[in-house]
Amino acid sequence: MKQSQLFTRTQKEISKDEVSINAQLLIRAGFIDKLMAGTYTILPLGLRVMKKIEQIIREEMNAIDGQEIFMPTLHPKENWIKTGRWDSMDDLYKVKDSSGREMALGPTHEEVVVPLMKRFISSYKDLPFAAYQFQNKFRMELRSKSGILRGREFMMKDLYSFHADAGDLDAYYEKAKQAYLKVFERVGLKNETYLTYASGGSFSKYSHEFQTLTEAGEDSIYVCERCRIAINKEIIDDLEHSCPECHEGNLDEKKAIEVGNIFKLMTKFSAPFDLKAKDENGEDIGIVMGCYGIGLGRLMGTIVEVLHDEKGMMWPEAVAPFKVHLLSLGENEEAQKIYQSLVEKGIEVLYDDRDTSAGEKFADSDLIGIPYRVVVSKKSLASGGVEVKRRDESESRIVRTEELSNILK
Ligand code: ATP
Ligand code: MG
């Protein structure tokens, strides 16, 4: 894509009320725009990142046999009354239409997915299976100071699994745990993300969160470096201050953000909707469920919080909006040829063909944070090619134009 055609622009200064690093950098670089506290428009560069994150998650959910669906945002009040959450969930947005009918804006989808599956499950032979979606969730968050880490409207992947018994749920839960670790590895957060023991509510001893270390995080976790796991501070008392795996007491307290979680729901939501199946003997069995969430916007914001320097963002290749940022410093004819040849080879390029100063192009390139920067200038051409630098390197090197695509492949 040619940068001159991008309708967004970078900004040097943004509103002072935006305090989080993720929102500051993403807004300045033109990846997102703030509509009001907790709600953001995703702009072209940001959407390219979101779609890559979405695709990685989709591949990993499909690999554990998740079937993709898309459920509505507007939910009937009756379903939320049935589970008790119409009254108990503080952050539920409630809306009323002109006839006085009340509805909820979905903050999560158990109240939709369970009655849905009543139509399709009758026997144990219909089990197990899992369904998931990517969908905007609505939550009346009071603290909305963390940019896209905590939105009032935000994109989530939520998967729900359905099982005939707890043993089957346990086995699937372990598969989901591994799939989650793969997602965080693929988006570039492997080293910073810890499988974290959290309180499991009433059914199991623990649930698991995936917590990424960052000062921007709202949670405190205790990390066991040896086992590469952590414990949420909120439950530390139960664990008597030792690692639940190696039982050593060497735990480091760190700030972190929850990027995903997995939870055994057991029959908490199947029971109120009377979701049952017949077993081999024709007896009714209550269906056991698990739920598994990842916030896509939060994940994008977390990547920015973890991977940036004083000049801007530093996207991992797997989720970068483009792989290459091609900068023409007054050599548009040569740069255009290079742009064309890279695009033909299937390499994603943002081509800065704008009529602006070299200083501005370099600063914008560092801010946007595309993994490879390729500069075409009189100087580079005189040295026999183009200047190539990775965003995380300090020095560039000259590469012959013919070799460029090999280096970038
Ligand atoms: P938190 O404790 O941070 O409020 P939660 O326990 O309410 O999170 P879940 O209901 O389990 O979160 O949602 C699943 C995932 O959705 C979370 O792991 C997180 O990645 C994401 N998420 C939750 N709330 C928000 C939000 N307000 N904005 C963006 N992402 C969110
Ligand atoms: Mg919450």
Image: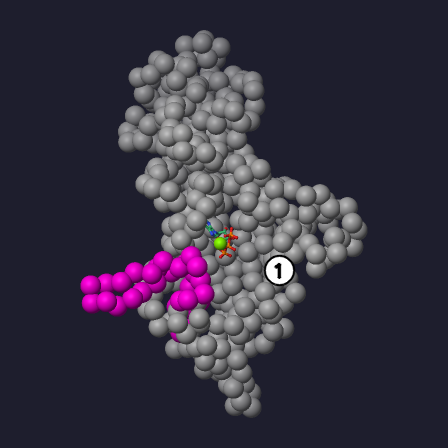
Magenta stretch, residue numbers: 86-115
Residue displayed at 43% across by 20% down:
363
Q: Specify few, some or many for label 1: CA neighbours under 10 Å numbering under 14, 14-19, or 20 or more.
A: many
Q: Quadrant of the N terminus?
A: top left
Residue 252 against residue 156 in the figure, above or below = above
Task: Say which of 347 and 155 sits in front.
Answer: 155
Q: Farthest left residue?
A: 98
Task: Examine the structure image and report whether residue 15 is included in the region drawn in magenta.
Answer: no
Amino acid type at image mark 1: Ser
Task: Identify residue for label 1.
Answer: 199
Q: Does the residue labelled 1 lie within 8 Å of ligand 1?
A: no
Residue displayed at 44% across by 59% down:
90
On the image, the x and y values in percent for residue 42 come to: 36, 41
On the image, the x and y values in percent for residue 206 come to: 64, 62
Q: Is residue 196 visible?
A: no
Total labels drawn: 1
Residue displayed at 45% across by 41% down:
145
Residue 375 against residue 109 in the figure, above or below = above
Q: Is residue 243 left or right of residue 328?
A: right
On the image, the x and y values in percent for residue 193 come to: 61, 45
Q: Is residue 153 visible?
A: yes
On the image, the x and y values in percent for residue 301 come to: 48, 40
Residue displayed at 63% across by 54% down:
234
Task: Examine the structure image and report whether residue 87 is included in the region drawn in magenta.
Answer: yes
Q: In this view, does 230 lie to the left or right of 278?
A: right
| Secondary structure category for the residue under label 1 | strand
Residue 2 against residue 168 in the figure, above or below = above
Residue 74 is drawn in which quadrant?
A: bottom left
